[in-house]
Amino acid sequence: MSREWRASTFREDVRAFIARLLPRGWKGVGALPVGDVDAFVTQWRDTLATAGLLGLSWPREYGGGGLSHAEEIVLAEELARAKVPGGAPWDPMGMQMLGPTLLEWGSEAQKAHFLPRILRGEDRWCQGFSEPDSGSDLGSLSTRAVADGEFWHVDGQKVWTSSAQVADWIFVLARTSREESAHHGMSFVLVPMDQPGVEVRPITMLSGEREFNEVFFTDAVTHRENVLGPVGAGWKVAMTLLSYERSHVAATLPIQYEQEFERLLALVERRGLGRDALVRDQIAQAYTQLSVLASLGRRVKAQISQGGPPGRESQLIKLAWSEYHRDLAELAINLLGPEAMVVEGRQGPFLPYTADYPGAPISSGAWIGTLLHSRSDTLVGGTSEIQRNICAERVLGLPR
């Protein structure tokens, strides 16, 4: 049974809740044996759901907590500080991206059907935006959805689709009219994955994991009512979704990166590099970048807490965090020196499931895993080149 959370003391309530449930000496999910991580994450998600801490700002009539975005940000921050996830690995697509977008653009029938199922974990979602010839430049996408009676028929290909191998549904940006001009004639279509017209092919990453996928649509079908927002308004809906994604990142990544920075300082101390002038300069530069990232995050959180949409800072923060993390991972590998040539210890995946944690031996495997994952940071969600164009045109008002 969900408990009532007091908005006036919400942060204290969340901290007490977390402290009560986690074992003494908890150091984070990365400290668990590899074979225990999945079971813990599943159990932890169930715990959050039972406590009413999933969909915290969603209306109660759809199963949410009925609180404000401010409390939702506080929750994300405290979970990050405690080194526990805010849900299952597939939840960000449904909880942090599609759910808020449904609340803004969805019909009453769509909200009543999909939102409770997302909260209960009955529907897992993935994102169908990028294509082989249309990555960051989504205006050139070619996947089509054609209306025929009660159904849309979808044909095309998507790529870099995270968690498609476990998803039940995919939200697809597809062309639904003959209008070929960029950003026009697209619709935001919700397509079930379990059908003959959808094929998923995993892609092996640098780290050896297979999180990304190609998704092929060959006369895949979805009901006519499964368009989010007006037909033809897909670009606006997609931009809404991306703004929600980046606002959550603004709340959690600075905290996680602060924890990672502490591990970098521990590496410097262990190798006795603290008196090296060049190393001290590199550490100072990394700290400056982290401080800028945290400042941008605070500004985005303030906008959301006041009930407004994420502002221009949400465009800047993606460029800031992706390049910061790439540079930090390279610095850590350089500081490891010859140790980085041999993988020792657990090769940790992306935060917050990192293998390095405060008080643990600094392993080369964890930093190598961080390096390999960081290479995708400047590509995922829009390349740095595209992000600079967006910041120049939409934030600074410069000509194309």
Image (tube, rainbow, N blue to C red):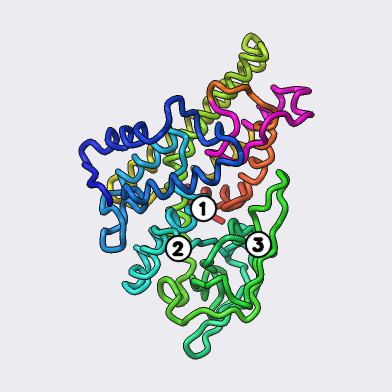
Q: Using the rendered image of the protein, determine whether residue 264 is visible from the camera's viewpoint.
A: yes
- Number of marks in picture: 3
Q: Residue at x 43, y 53 (%)?
A: 96
Q: Position of residue 242 (x, y in %)?
A: 48, 56
Residue 331 lies in the magenta stretch: yes
Q: Position of residue 347 (x, y in %)?
A: 67, 36
Residue 77 lies in the magenta stretch: no
Mark 2 neighbour density, 10 Å: few (under 14) some (14–19) many (20 or more): few
Q: What distance separates the C-alpha of mark 3 from that of mark 2? A: 24 Å
Report the span colored magenta.
328-357
Q: Position of residue 173 (x, y in %)?
A: 54, 69
Q: Using the rendered image of the protein, determine whether residue 137 is visible from the camera's viewpoint.
A: no
Nearer the N terminus, badge 3 or badge 1?
3
Name the residue carrying label 2.
122
Q: Position of residue 363 (x, y in %)?
A: 66, 26
Q: Image height check: is 295 above or below 382? A: above
Quadrant location of the C terminus?
A: bottom right
Name the residue carrying label 1.
393
Q: Residue at x 56, y 79 (%)?
A: 145
Residue toward you, 170 or 168: 168
Q: Amino acid at mark 2?
A: Glu
Q: What distance separates the C-alpha of mark 3 from that of mark 1? A: 27 Å
Q: Amino acid at mark 1?
A: Glu
Q: Amino acid at mark 3?
A: Val
Nearer the N terminus, badge 2 or badge 1?
2
Q: What distance separates the C-alpha of mark 2 from that of mark 1? A: 40 Å
Nearer the N terminus, badge 3 or badge 2?
2
Q: Residue at x 55, y 34 (%)?
A: 32
Residue toward you, 142 or 75: 75
The mark closer to the camera, 3 or 2, is 2
The mark closer to the camera, 3 or 1, is 3
Name the residue carrying label 3.
159
